[in-house]
Image (cartoon, rainbow, N blue to C red):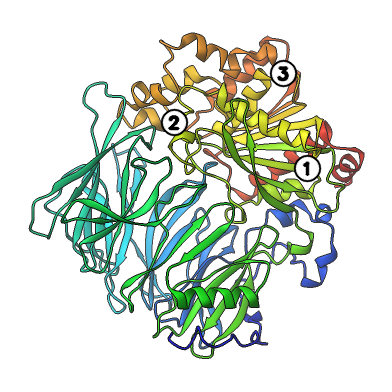
Amino acid sequence: MNHSAKSLLRVFSVACATWLATGAMAQTTTESLTAEATAIKASAIPLETFLRRPEFQDMSLSPNGDFLAAVSPFKGRGNLVVIDLAQRSRRLLTSFETTDVANFYWVNNKRICMRVADGQDVTGNFSYRGTFCINTDGTEFADFTRIDKKSSTDQGRAILFNPVRAVGPDSVEYIISMPARSSRSNDLYRFNTITGRYTLLTFNSPGDVERWILDRNQVPRIAVTSEPRQGNETFTRIGIWHRESADAKWEKLYENRQTWGVTVGDAISPIAFDYDNTTVYMASNIGRDKMAIFKYDTKTKKFGELVFEHPLIDLTGGLLFSNEKKKLVGIRYSAEMPATKWLDPELETLQKQIDAAIPGNVNNIGVVEEKSKRLLMISASPTNPGQYFLYDNEGKSIEPLVKRREWLPPSSMPERKFIKYKARDGMEIPAWVTIPKGTSGKNLPLVLHIHGGPQVRNYYGIQWQGRTPIAQFLASRGYVVLEPEPRGSTGFGRKHYESSYKQWGLAMQDDLTDGALHLVKEGLVDKNRMCLYGGSYGGYASLQGVVREPDLWKCTAPVVAVTDLFLLQQVQHSDIAERGDNSLDTEFTVAVGDSKRDEAQFTKTSPARNVDKINIPVLLSMGSDDRRVPIIHGNDFVKKMQAAGRGNLVEYVVYNGEGHGFNKDANVLDHFGRLERFLAKNIGDESQKRLVASK
């Protein structure tokens, strides 16, 4: 692209690709709102419209730029569609009715593999159910799901492989990772996506491998291991192993410590080899609070140049390489808003040109190579659900394709902004606030939306990915939505996470309360109209908030909620307990506590054991088949509320067939319909109550 950065972009192609929005794959169950409806009030947009699946999700360009693939709704599920850019036609490749295409990848220019799942849980994790491959013309469909059965009557579980790297643009093979030789250790295989035959690439393995890193010659050179705890060690040991060649011996470079799935203390995390096959890009927080990206010399075993750091977040990936220039050219990350740090001047100039052509949005471009025909871009903002564009590398023009949710006009969508506030002990808490449009911006009702985990990062400046745009929906109904990342969340440095040890229901809870009170102090929120809402850990905190501050909240709506910390550690039919790795008696005691040694604290911070403090309306929703937080949590809580004479405060809903999150369209619609009515009744003003009553 020597001359692409020197020439200004041409005006948009006038031929907007309306062919993508028509044909056999078009949604027929819900009528689209047209682009002319931009003046519509967000509050008037029906619930069904807000919850409608995106028309195109996770769109991806084939290696040669001739085809587009995307996940599109069909029969109430996300299915795979492919678009021939030369013919301007599309083909439905799958018709799954009980699962969704969760993610997919190009094997070569004409073959795609995908993993399917029954939706996502409340923490964003997929429950994978199968792996399939298919050609773009619909031929040679293959099911590569392996089922591990414990008995003849057991339905078993799917053993799924993870994609690692394509072999080449003309090969039907792909390098994959899967635990075929041992359930405790992943190996790498060269996998034929048509025949299903595979060749082991890591016969010589250090064992207990979680992930592998290949060098530029596709040789497995780094292994990250998760080593069994010895006795009652409270930390898992994460080994970083390296070898000089395929025949060399493995050498341990470093050992991290991990608790409850999160690396703690000084740590390193290998990302990728540079083109010299000696330098590794490594994330590290040694001697610092947040992970930054460094160069690491595998021969001298020493860190070199600091490549990139950010004052707000940990950096652990997002590297963009140019195969033509044989160098790292950019780093993609998401702090207050998504961004790319371009290390290549030509790509930085191109980014500026595209930003000037499509102002007001975050324009996510990839690496343009000299031989690239086209480049797929996604352009979005906090108010714009996003539109796909094609950048023509030869003509230096941009062609608009489709909008992901054209029925949600950006001019009507609520505003979203990043804030930081101080908790009562001085710790700064990052958060995002979504503010209803067309309101006074003063003394509004608040929904405090609490994420699950809690050891995840769940909120971003642009929050349109996923099944349901929760913050935008709630804000459209007139509620300020606060989405904080309290201590215990990951991605904001070691202090932010490690200060959460044994603070469930205590300092972690105060972080949430202090965020709400900060918005009250700012004049944005009415202190007398605040409600809690969240799933999993967020469901726990939605109940514990009432226990800790019984006079502050007017309602709470926990989802798939932990209600009793004793049950969380002791119930043996949860998927955590069934792993058999003893983590509930070791790592759990560091992050959360121990039901025996910390009995008094667990009693104080278990909502089901403090129902006498809960005197406000509760909308509790659970999944009948939840294996992360079994339904005993909901049943036990409701029984105790009834025994205390408070059963009339609880609306208890159990969704049959759902797990740790709700994915069936009918259940999603029912849940958010109940939530809308619940909020209007308890913290809504008269106009909000009338709006709900009119539906």
Element on which disc 2 rests: helix
- Amino acid under label 1? Tyr
State the CA–CA distance, disc 3 to disc 1: 21 Å
Q: Are there few (<14), some (14-19), or many (20+) residues within 10 Å of tag 2?
A: some
Q: Compared with residue 262, is residue 508 higher up or lower down, i.e. above or below?
A: above
State the CA–CA distance, disc 3 to disc 2: 28 Å
Is residue 22 at least partly visible in the picture? no
State the CA–CA distance, disc 2 to disc 1: 32 Å
- Amino acid under label 3? Pro
Q: Compared with residue 493, is residue 552 higher up or lower down, i.e. above or below?
A: above
Is residue 88 at least partly visible in the picture? yes
Based on the displayed image, in which of its 4 quarters is residue 511 positioned? top right
Q: Are there few (<14), some (14-19), or many (20+) residues within 10 Å of tag 3?
A: some
- Say whether marks 3 and 2 touch (CB < 8 Å): no
**Location of mark 1 (residue):** 479
- Left or right for 372, reference 46: left
Mark 3 vs 1, N-terminal side: 1
**Location of mark 2 (residue):** 498
Element on which disc 3 rests: loop
**Location of mark 3 (residue):** 550
Residue 356 appears at what percent x and percent y? 64, 76
**Image quarter of the N terminus:** bottom left
Mark seen at residue 88: none
Residue 591 appears at what percent x and percent y? 43, 26
- Left or right for 456, reference 612: left
Select label 2 or label 1 by which is in front. 2
Comparing 389 with 666, the one in front is 389
- Say whether marks 3 and 1 touch (CB < 8 Å): no
- Amino acid under label 2? Glu
Residue 472 appears at what percent x and percent y? 71, 51
Q: Residue at x 37, y 54 (%)?
A: 293
